[in-house]
Image (cartoon, helix red, strand yellow):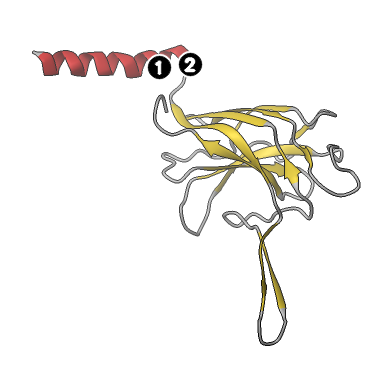
Amino acid sequence: MVNKASVILLSLGIVAHAGATGRASLARFEGGIGVIPVSNVAVNATTGAVTVNRNIVKGVNPPGQIWVIADLKADIDADGHITVKGRGLLLGGGNAIGQNANQSVFATLICEAAAPFVEHSSAAAGVALEANGDFRIDDTLDSTPSACPSRTLLIRSAGGRTWFAAGIPKLGGDD
């Protein structure tokens, strides 16, 4: 009797969550990480040769400059609908520090842990960053994965297609 009641309550909770949003969740992200274009620099002790490794994430190149982001929240539904709200996506270095560089951005979801990586993106034309770096994406991905076991969300330049920021996956709870 107790097990049957637990199953019924759990089922009602799942249906209530999907009903409250109107959609079943594929992935959620809370918080963001700005890009640091270089992942490491190595100097050969014998030859003095310097090797610079770019911060490439799942096959997507970084830009040439540091970018910061104050906050990011994203929801991706099982049907591919994506909403992203970003705050303060701005240059974090160089002469234009603190500015948006007149960029437009789009979102890419990648679900594979290892190559080959499949990109699921919002419209590549993107949305313009406001002067303070705020932006909002409300779109549908160009393709929708059936599952997303190793979720990575990248906010990318509509011009160069490089990544400026990454979402922090929300684990557990209601996704």
Q: Position of residue 136 (x, y in %)?
A: 70, 26
Determine whether, in the image, residue 95 is placed left or right of residue 169.
right
The answer to whether 45 is drawn above or below residue 140 in the figure is below
Q: Amino acid at mark 2?
A: Thr
SS category of the residue bearing label 1: helix
In-image side of 44 versus 26 (left or right)? right
Give the percent coordinates (x, y) of residue 110.
53, 46
Residue lying furthest front = 45
Residue type, label 1: His
**Disc 1: which residue:** 17
- What residue is pinned by disc 2? 21
Percent position of residue 115, x then y:
50, 59
Determine the residue positioned at 44% across, 41% down. 148
Estimate how packed mark 1 is, as few (under 14), some (14 to 19) or many (20 or more) residues with alpha carbons within 10 Å: some
Asked if marks 1 and 2 touch (Cβ < 8 Å), the reply is: yes
**Label 2 element class:** helix
Quadrant of the image occupied by residue 124: top right
Q: Is residue 123 above or below residue 1?
A: below
Which image quadrant for residue 123? top right
Q: Residues within 10 Å of mark 2 (few under 14, many from 20)?
A: few
Residue 127 lies left or right of residue 175; in this view the side is right
Q: Residue furthest bottom?
A: 46
Q: CA distance from mark 1 to mark 2?
A: 6 Å
- Quadrant housing the C terminus: top left
